[in-house]
Image (cartoon, rainbow, N blue to C red):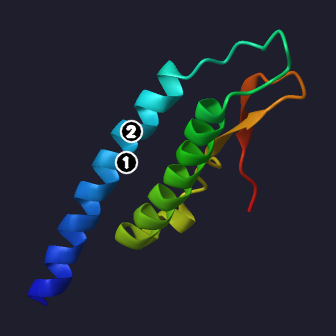
Amino acid sequence: MYLVNKNNELLKDVLVNMTETCNQIYTKIDRQPKDDYETSEEDLLLLKSFNTFVTINQLILDKLYPERKQMNLPNPKHLGLTKHGQIVEIEVTA
């Protein structure tokens, strides 16, 4: 039982760190349309990282707090690209 509690604490630490990283990416990523319709490799990497972290955060939250399934919570948001290279929010559907 000690190992399970220790792992739960570790998952909580991971969750906090990844949430902080998501918040940093979400608030600082350049969302302006690009004049040349080109998205940089850095933008794409940040976008993919954000979306991966959001997905992992949701899995951790569901594991730590199984009662969430009955709470009718809104779907998480990912970041996506428009055809003009603008980064926008998109809702994840199950």
Q: Residue furthest right?
A: 83
At label 2, counting other C-alpha atoms closer than 10 Å, the crowd grade (few under 14, some 14-19, many 20 or more) is some
At label 1, counting other C-alpha atoms closer than 10 Å, the crowd grade (few under 14, some 14-19, many 20 or more) is some
The residue labelled by disc 2 is 21
Residue occupying image coordinates x 76% and y 55%: 93
Q: Residue furthest bottom?
A: 1
In the drawing, what numbered circle is on residue 18? 1
Give how far across and how far down residue 90 sits, in percent: 74, 38
Placement of the N terminus among the 4 image quadrants: bottom left
Q: Residue furthest left?
A: 2
> Is disc 2 in contact with disc 1, using a CB cutoff of under 8 Å?
yes
- Frontmost residue, 49 versus 19: 49
- Frontmost residue, 53 versus 77: 53
The amino acid on which the numbered mark 1 sits, given as a three-letter code, is Met
Q: Quadrant of residue 61?
A: bottom left
Give how far across and how far down residue 14 sits, in percent: 29, 57
Tell me: 84 left or right of 33.
right
The amino acid on which the numbered mark 2 sits, given as a three-letter code, is Thr
8 is higher (above) or lower (below) than 61 = below
Residue occupying image coordinates x 16% and y 78%: 5
Give how far across and how far down residue 41 sits, in percent: 65, 35
32 is higher (above) or lower (below) than 14 = above
**SS of the residue at dot 2?**
helix
Placement of the C terminus among the 4 image quadrants: bottom right
